Amino acid sequence: MKKTTGLLIGFLITMYGMGCMGQMGLSQKAIGVNLKLVDNRYGRAGIYILGAPIYAVTSIIDLFIINSIEFWTGTNPITKKKPAIVDTPVDAWMKVDDNLDPAATEAPLSFLGMPVESIDITTPDSSSIKMDLRFEDGTMQSVVGLRSPEGYVNIFVDDRLVAYATHEALETYVAEIRRTQPVTIAAQSSR
């Protein structure tokens, strides 16, 4: 029972984490069918109540699948409308795009990286790992992972905290990369 409950909670958290804002195109299509069934407003309202389970299912599909596709590609696959609703220009109360690389402000995201010339990995101490990247254009970038007392690994890029993860999540991520993209990296310990 505990295992089933844990799996259900994990599934729900994953679903809620994947939901994205979008045009709700499939739900619009379902409501459009309702409007075409009868020309009377009371008849439409009655059909709307009877079709509530259908609208619930189409809303869930929109929220977790279709809107996610719209968010990451910039186009809703059902309505074919551009831009994605989250990219619609408005006079926003909070301005954050001014601080971002322009390539990261709209979908689909542009490739932000450059070809890497070399990677040097060192372990300065038992609770940290450092990766220095040298790009083909001569620029360098430093990525550092520091183990925190709470059990997380804080990840810094050029001395700026960009992410944190559990050790187990990082191991799973690395295993997946190794499985899908064979990479050979020479690591050197400075101990």
Image (cartoon, rainbow, N blue to C red):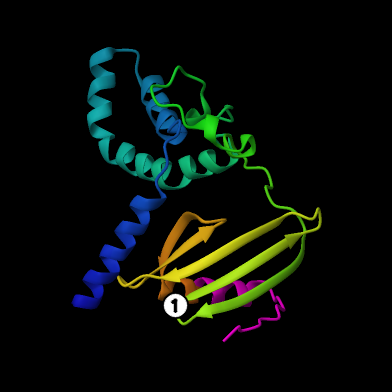
Name the side, left or right, on which 50 lies relative to 25.
Answer: left
Q: Residue at x 31, y 72 (%)?
A: 149
The image quadrant that residue 36 belongs to is top left
Residues 157 and 78: in front is 157
Name the residue: 64% across, 72% down: 180
Q: Amino acid at mark 1?
A: Ser
- Residue lying at the far left of the rendered structure: 1
Q: Depth check: give the residue in front, 11 or 143.
A: 143
Q: Is residue 190 magenta?
A: yes
Residue range corresponding to the magenta coloring: 173-191
Task: Name the image quarter holding the C terminus.
Answer: bottom right
- Residue 137 position, x and y percent, is 81, 53
In the displayed structure, 133 sits above or below 57; it is: below
Q: Does the stretch in magenta take in 189? A: yes
Q: Position of residue 165 (x, y in %)?
A: 41, 65
The N terminus, quarter of image:
bottom left
Residue at 34% x, 51% y: name it.
Answer: 16
* On screen, residue 33 above or below 143: above
Residue at 45 percent across and 57 percent down: it is 163
- Can the viewer see residue 51? yes
Within-10-Å neighbours for mark 1: few <14, some 14–19, many 20+: few
Q: Which residue is mark 1?
A: 127
Residue closest to the eye, 158 or 62: 158
Could you say whether the residue bearing mark 1 is in a helix, strand or loop? loop
Q: Position of residue 48 (x, y in %)?
A: 27, 27
